[in-house]
Image (cartoon, helix red, strand yellow):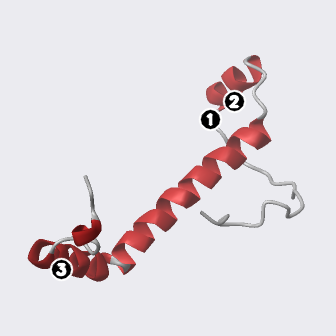
Amino acid sequence: MADLYDIAAPKKATNLSLNSDLLAKARGLQLNLSATLEQALSEKLKTIESEKWKKENQAAVSAYNEFVVENGCLGDEYREF
């Protein structure tokens, strides 16, 4: 899968407001907040883009599934298992 954003783009300082207890516990575990947030945002972006793709292609997927029910999979005649 192609990257959904430019992973080589420069970093940019950002101000955030976080739950103070959550922040204290994360710092207590010496978590890299920037890396953790970047990973979480990347996963969220993947989820949103995946759902968007499913909605945009729902008709095509349904049409293909209907075709398979009626005609079988393409290449079935060559399958040896």
Residue 26, compared with residue 17, is above or below; it is above
Q: Judging from the image, what secondary structure is the residue with disc 3 in?
A: helix
Disc 2 residue type (three-letter)? Leu
Which one is nearer the viewer's eye here, 78 or 59?
A: 78
| Mark sitting earlier along the chain (2/3) | 2
Q: CA distance from mark 1 to mark 2?
A: 6 Å
Q: Residue at x 38, y 80 (%)?
A: 56
Marks counted in the figure total 3
Q: Position of residue 10 (x, y in %)?
A: 90, 61
Q: Are marks 1 and 3 in contact (CB under 8 Å)?
A: no
The answer to which image quadrant residue 19 occupies is top right
Q: Position of residue 59 (x, y in %)?
A: 27, 82
Disc 1 residue type (three-letter)? Asn
Residue under label 2, please give it. Answer: 23
Q: Judging from the image, what secondary structure is the residue with disc 1 in?
A: loop
Q: Residue at x 75, y 27 (%)?
A: 31
Can see residue 17?
no
Q: Are marks 1 and 2 in contact (CB under 8 Å)?
A: yes
In the displayed structure, does residue 48 sit left or right of residue 45? left
Q: Residue at x 22, y 76 (%)?
A: 62
Question: Of the numbered discs in the image, which one, if any, rests on residue 42?
Answer: none
For discs 1 and 3, the disc positioned in front in the rendered view:
3
Residue under label 3, please give it. Answer: 67
For discs 2 and 3, the disc positioned in front in the rendered view:
3
Can see residue 79?
yes
Q: CA distance from mark 1 to mark 3?
A: 51 Å
Q: What crowding class fits label 3: few (fewer than 14 Cα within 10 Å), some (14-19), or many (20 or more)?
A: few
Question: Of the numbered discs in the image, which one, if any, rests on residue 19?
Answer: 1
In the displayed structure, does residue 22 sit left or right of residue 34? left
